[in-house]
Image (cartoon, grey):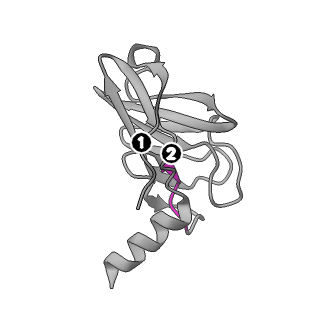
Amino acid sequence: MADPARWQRVAALSEIPNGGFKCVDVEGVSLLICRLYADAYALINNCPHQNQRMDDGSMFEYEIVCPHHGACFDVRDGSRLSGPSVYPLGGYPCRVVAGEVEVDLANADSSMERYLRGAAAVR
């Protein structure tokens, strides 16, 4: 069972360009807060391929591209789209409340957890 939610404000939605992202550090964790229109998504700022930062990467629509080796991920759920990474990006639950982006810090979703869920769904 997941821990009780612990939502924390990380940015105003207006601070993040539509179709772009903002890097924030929250309690020692580097996050990419990605925006698509009125929605926001919180991803861990490390590519699972070689654990390198993603904040110099680029975003096009719902895809974020690692600047180091070109791995592509879906910002909506961290799923791997292409490139050398086998694993998806980890992330946190994220919501927008009254124009403020909040992240549930108690319920991290690691890249391995996402990978195992995806593998189970294929079976």
Residue furthest to the bottom in view is 123
Q: Residue at 54% across / 58% down in the picture? A: 110
Q: Is residue 90 magenta?
A: yes
Task: Give above or below for 78 relative to 93.
Answer: below
- Mark 2 vs mark 1, CA separation in Å: 6 Å
Read off the magenta span. Answer: 87-91
- Tell me which residue sits at (56%, 69%) in the image: 86
Which residue was labeled with disc 2?
106
Which residue is located at x 37 percent, y 24 percent?
18
Residue type, numbered disc 1: Ala
Residue 30 falls in image quadrant: top right
Identity of the residue drawn at 40% across and 14% down: 14
In the rendered image, which quarter contains the C terminus? bottom left
Q: Earlier in the sequence, mark 2 or mark 1?
A: 1
Residue 69 versus residue 25 in the image, above or below: below
Marks 2 & 1, CB-CB < 8 Å contact: yes
**Residue 119 at what x, y percent from top left?**
41, 77
| Rendered-image quadrant of the N terminus | bottom left
Residue 64 rendering spot, x and y as whole percentages? 48, 44
Q: Does residue 19 appear to the left or right of 32 in the view shown? A: left
